[in-house]
Image: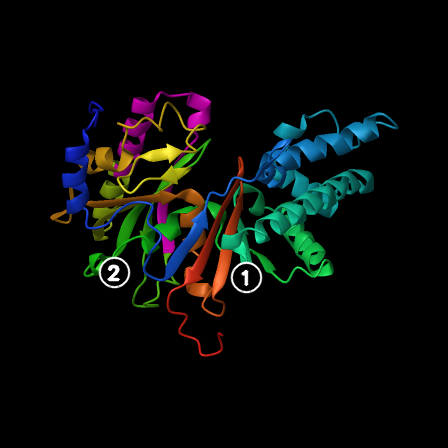
Amino acid sequence: MFFTLRCLDMSTRTTELSSNLAGHGLADLAAVHLDTYNAQLRDSEGFIGDRASARAFRTLLEDERESMRRVDGDPIGDVPSSDISKKKLDKLVLEGDPEAAGVVLGTIEAFAQEFAAVIRRFMRLKDWRGTERIVVGGGLRASRIGELAIGRTGVLLKAAEQLVQLQPIRHDPDEAGLIGCVHLAPSWIFSGHDAILAVDIGGSNIRAGIVEMCLRKASDLSKSRVWSSDLWRHADDEPDREEAVQRLVGMLQALIKRADEDAMRLAPFIGIGCPGIIREDGSIEKGGQNLPGDWEHKNFNLPELLREAIPALDGHKVTVLMHNDAVVQGLSESPFMRDVRHWGVMTMGTGLGNARFTNVDPGNDKLP
């Protein structure tokens, strides 16, 4: 289904927003209060978080390889560091030539040192003080080398007496970005339904999926799972903004058809995780520079366009809610964070996504 993107004035936005029953990018969510997100710390060299990104890991790997080339040749070979898959790096650590494994392990150590320094800077921020646990997601986490980097960073923090727990996000990061969307939805919208539509937008990929809530197994949504999903690597196609939205609509329509064929009842809700600062009306204030086209334009509003393209599900008007992608990925962990009060998420992707939460009702008398 193709449609024309249009500019909407503020009065139209306000009317449609009121019908949506909630705003986008809000701090007060069902189970948590969002204390802060998308913190952008800078020094003379640029954004501090960039030192703990997936791109930074590749840069450090190339530095390690270059030091070997100057002495006795590169044990990893001639493939550029940017083109070596995480699976290949995992295999080098577990089964590879000892020197090649040493290069990767050296990179992990250097990255962990940088990541620990970044976390220490975050912990000095007012909104991050008192953080008890940080879950780490993002693309790099979806590998053994990422897990080792997280583990080594945690050791370094403990050695420096920085009392914050560090752990990998429990879901595959690709799925966490979809599963977190169920925690954006108002609880009443689940009644009589099996699943929701969810979207995870990144600088390279757009993933759309159906998240089954599994409420009969766990009313706190802890058993939610991705029932089906589709991935489009938009970075390969270099679409403009209109083409990207049309492609996303097509992905969602295909998922709706798939759910209908399997008699899965979709709630009239679409959750979206998207990079950047999300305004209450669903537009992007800043941080969308890696997305196809100008997503920060004041008259571009993705939730409104999706609601226009998919106006109803199961006979009910569709509600669309959007929040920052790191926030949404973090929300996938919220059922498992009830033993602490203050916790955060950091996602190692194109940059370092981040968010800090405070549990609204811990439900645990062991908490202070």
Q: Residue at x 33, y 49 (%)?
A: 26
Where does label 2 land, which residue? 187
- Packing grade of label 2 (10 A; few <14, some 14-19, many >=20) is few
In the displayed orientation, state which residue is furthest to the right: 71
Q: Residue at x 23, y 48 (%)?
A: 269
Give the alpha-carbon distance from disc 1 to disc 2, as whole Å: 29 Å
Q: Amino acid at mark 1?
A: Gly
Q: How is the image coloured?
A: rainbow
Residue 325 drawn above or below residue 187: above
The reply to whether residue 263 is in sight is no
* 183 displayed left or right of 131: left
Start-end of magenta stretch: 225-252
* 210 displayed left or right of 1: right
Which of the 4 quarters of the picture holds residue 283?
top left
Q: How many marks?
A: 2
| Residue 367 x %, y % | 48, 74
Name the quadrant of the N terminus: top left
